[in-house]
Image: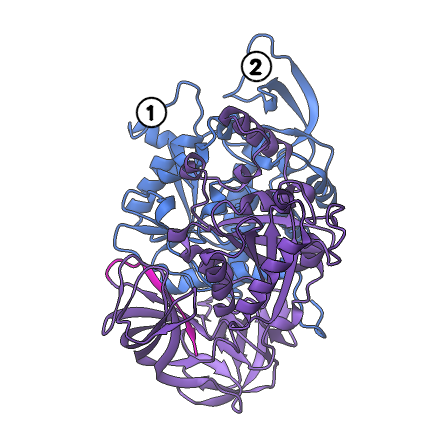
Chain colours: A purple, B blue
Amino acid sequence: MELLRFATAGSVDDGKSTLIGRLLYDTKSIFEDQLESIERTSRDRGDEQTNLALLTDGLRAEREQGITIDVAYRYFATPKRKFIIADTPGHIQYTRNMVTGASTANLALILVDARNGLVEQSRRHAFIASLLRVPHLVLCVNKMDLVDYDEEVFNRIKNEFRQFATKLDIGDLSFIPVSALHGDNIVHRSENMPWYDGSSLLHHLEEVHIASDRNLIDARFPVQYVIRPQAQTNHDLHDYRGYAGMVAGGVFKPGDDVVVLPSGLQTTIAAIDTAKGPVDEAFAPMSVTIRLADDIDVSRGDMLCRPHNQPKVTQDVDAMLCWLSEDKLSVRGMYALKHTTRNVRAQVRELDYRIDVNTLHRDETADQLSLNEIGRVRLRTTQPLFLDEYRRNRTTGSFLLIDEATGATVAAGMIL
Amino acid sequence: MSSHTYELTHLESLESESIHIIREVAAEFERPVLLFSGGKDSVIMLHLAAKAFFPARIPFPVMHVDTGHNFPEVLEFRDRTVEQLGVRLVVASVEDAIAKGRVRERPDGIRNPLQTVPLLDAINDNQFDAVFGGARRDEEKARAKERVFSFRDEFGQWDPKNQRPELWSLYNGRHHKGEHIRVFPLSNWTELDVWQYLAQENIELPSIYFAHQREVFRRDNMWYAISQWTQPREGEEVVTLTVRYRTVGDVPVTGAVESTAASYDEVIAETAATRITERGATRGDDRLTEAAMEDRKREGYF
């Protein structure tokens, strides 16, 4: 069974938690004791209906304020697929969580309230989903019950969004009119909207094709850990030296010629080991251990790739940054940079521009980035990195900036 | 996996993600430790750790936070497993902590909440900087909000409103001396995934996870075992039932469920059909308040 990860985003009160609650409820993924617990809480709070949002808003502060503060992960399965939902808050000061949820998502689900249409947050979320290259995007127009299931309202929002989306790079875009509260078009097609001839949300999630979204062309293996058994008792293992890691792209096979970066030394793959025994091939995102034919110096942070298909080796990095910290980005500031299994330091040399996420206007006079702001920067690193464009590979094209004093993750970077 | 389409099953994806996390910790931390209680989640975690470093040994010790109220089958299993894998076992004892006056026995005798102090003491004494826990996000709503790499301050506290964003498969383990990171490699596994994987890998578990006869009594809608710490009160009738455990914890607060599931396949069928969460069905202590888990986690609990 395949695993699909999707992120949900919406503005405050778009009914996102209700929608997730509905998906869980209608796929029978909610347990009786959980339901009893939220029914009791709903009653205590005087809610008219059982508040499905309470299923995901698990923190005390969230319940008190009635808003979602942090990404919550939820799990459900149908006979066709297993799903991991990253439920990301729409509240403006917590937008950084959308970036977190979107970074691993196969699909992003953006909710808008049919009564309000597109708002600043919807545009922002669509932009973030496209920036993070979530391959599939679904716009759910929610609360259709409150606009009398009017096709006109749906079409107006759909057209407005399409127009906005032409400025973005979105691979696959779908629109679904729903009422999360009443379950219209969530699991089953709604009888209240006979004018809609697309699939229900769940059907779409089950059928959307995700297998081709990975990069199976550019072979990349960041060395994560060197396995050297210190086995006095087992002499067979005395000379064992394996390079453990997760394949970040392409396919590796025993006998393949490989080059080790940064040394540039070439050798061949002797074997690909797993605890269950050797395998004939390894592809993303398998965790394996590669043994090489020659005894050469390889350590954590190095990368194996094919001699005729190598990433860019450079200390100059052009990237889009999503700023995640209350402390502003400072030009000339030094940060720790984490890229695949490589840790280096980086200085911000230039801020080329800051993007207004509502108009997509580029402000080239900007000299800083604040929390939730996005801009294009040029970095200089203390050691070379082995880079692919983020659009080609989400693993070898992404990095974090970390504040060296506090240890906080301050930015998510996507290489251009 | 099918080599023609380069697809992984959901269990292969989850396994690979967990192994990646475990290796990342071994590479970036100086003194990791893996919490091992003999419960099914910690058994899987230990199994994944063995896989991650194969054919070398697991390069860190394991730790059991021992409430002193153990199922004997589980203790025996713990010791045997640790010996087979050749890893060092550290025991942090609630009983010792009570004897030393570090914590006080509660009037209700429940010791799960008392584990926090000996856990944090052992982390400090051994200078552990990364602590693997087997918690899953599907278990409980506060856990659903927690990161894979979860920062703990010098008091072991979790601050749910100030968590580091966690993106892609890049994990930020930065911390100062005295602080540590809790690491949850099974974050994305569900109870059903766990059982399916145990079956697929044919992993041994303590026998109490499978159906057996036991003398139990009914209290607060749960079946509790008769033991040296738990006796029926007046009016609580003792019956012999065929039961099994869905979770393994402090004996006085861990309930059994009526079940005839004696094999993995039977447990999987039962788990797929169940309508009650495992903590709801078996953990008396989680029912204390709506936010019981969040409150305990803030203080440094698992």
User: Where residue A117 appears, x then y in whole percent?
Assistant: 54, 54
Give me the chain letter of mark 2: B
The kind of residue on which mark 1 rests is Arg
Q: Residue at x 66, y 44 (%)?
A: A148
Looking at the figure, which quarter contains the C terminus of chain B? top left
| Closest to the observer, B268 or A277 | B268
Q: Is residue A177 above or below residue A259?
A: above
The kind of residue on which mark 2 rests is Pro
Q: Are marks 2 and 1 on the same chain?
A: yes
Q: Is residue A301 above or below residue B77?
A: below
Q: Does residue B120 appear in the picture of this structure?
A: yes
Mark 2 residue element: loop
Work out which residue is located at the far top of the displayed protein and give it.
B234
**A307 lies left or right of B217:** left
User: Where residue A268 appears, x then y in whole percent?
Assistant: 55, 87
**B101 lies left or right of A8:** left
Q: Residue at x 45, y 38 (%)?
A: A66
Q: Is residue A226 above or below residue B76?
A: below
| Closest to the observer, A98 or A255 | A98
Looking at the figure, which quarter contains the N terminus of chain B? bottom right
Q: Does residue A287 appear in the picture of this structure?
A: no
Give me the chain letter of mark 1: B
Residue A412 colored in magenta in the image: yes
**Residue at which label 2 appears:** B232
**Residue at which label 1 appears:** B104
Q: Which residues are magenta?
A: A405-416
Mark 1 residue element: loop
Q: Residues within 10 Å of mark 1 (few under 14, many from 20)?
A: some
Of callouts 2 and 1, the N-terminal one: 1
Residue B34 colored in magenta in the image: no
Residue B128 badge: none
**B263 lies left or right of A411:** right
